[in-house]
Amino acid sequence: MKAKLLITLVSFFLVLEVNAQQTAGTSGLLNTPSADFNPDGTFSIGGNFLPQSITPAKFDYNTANYFFNITYFSFFEVTYRATLLKMKLKGQTDRKYCNQDRSVAVRLRALKESKYLPAIVFGANDVLTSRFLTMVDNKTKSNQYFGAIYGVTTKNFSLSENVLGLTLGYSYSDRMPEASGVLGGIRFSPSFYKPLSIITEYDASHFNVGASALLFNHLYLQVFTCEFKDVSAGIAYRGQLPVLKKKK
């Protein structure tokens, strides 16, 4: 029994090869999705500071979110995310962070990257919100602030043991016009420390430059600047569920 428990704990803290998360809590670049996928059973729990410049028009203030993300099998990823909202309660004159916008994001890998072909992923953000209720009851208003669908392709190249990843895609959002359009980015991981990624991207409306790093095999950090004006940062813990880990 003790041996089984020890094996379970060891498998839980395996060294992971993971991709940078984006501000939505999913695998991707910084504020842009990519077609990179984490290994089966990878999960992450974390949060991000979000400056006003990269949030929907509804947010005229800086905010933050927290999330739980998990990769099922080798082709499906789901994320639960909650973003803090400022509201003015009855009897108050100032708005306070007293509510949150809850949303779910899903990603489906249509094509796995190979030697000659890029990976292709289709995804949707904010897929389960009150928009469904709006279809049933016209009195219910949708608050799908981060709602968007996208398709993206990514190809990674090995250059003298350095890794260069190129991403290109298209996003559409009827709630966030600024999130509609062509997007893409470049990710570079040096050979001397591949868990470090230096990233530049265009998220359909902003140019962002930043970096992400995986420390101690589990602690993920991300920081970037939006148009060299505002700074966003995130932190997460990453692990792997033993029950979903592939058998060798």
Image: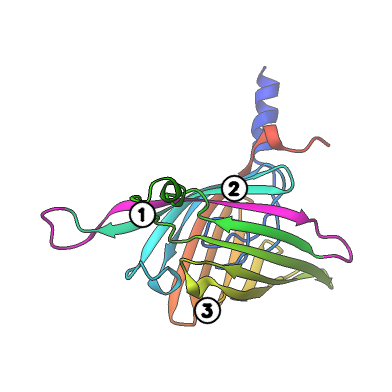
**SS at circle 3:** loop
Residue matched to label 2: 78
Q: State whether residue 89 is above or below residue 116.
A: above
Q: Is residue 60 magenta?
A: no
Q: Which label sits in the foreground, 1 or 3? A: 1
Who's the residue at 57% across and 68% down the image? 172
Residue at 49% over, 82% down? 227
* CA–CA distance in space, label 3 to label 2: 25 Å
Residue bounds of the magenta highlight: 90-117
- The kind of residue on which mark 3 rests is His
- Looking at the rendered image, the disc whose residue lies closer to the viewer, 1 or 2, is 1
Report the front residue among 234 and 98. Answer: 98
Between discs 3 and 2, the one toward the N terminus: 2
Q: Is residue 107 left or right of 59 when viewed as pictured?
A: right
Residue with the most extreme right position? 116
Camera-side residue of 213 and 65: 65
* Residue 39, position as x, y percentages in the image: 72, 48
Q: Kindly identify the amino acid type of the residue bearing the numbered disc 2.
A: Val
- Residue 236 showing in the rendered view: yes
Classify mark 3: residues with Cα within 10 Å, few (<14), some (14-19) or many (20+): some
Above or below, 47 against 233 in this view is: above
**Residue 127 position within the rendered picture, expressed as x and y whole percent measured from the top left:** 53, 52
The answer for how far apart the CA atoms under marks 1 and 2 are is 25 Å
Look at mark 1 in the image and give the residue it sits on: 141
Label 2: how many residues lie within 10 Å, few (<14), some (14-19) or many (20+)?
many
Q: Secondary structure at mark 2?
A: strand
Amino acid type assigned to the residue bearing label 1 in the image: Lys
* Disc on res. 206: 3
1 and 2 marks in contact (CB < 8 Å)? no
Please identify the quarter of the rendering in which residue 123 is found: bottom right
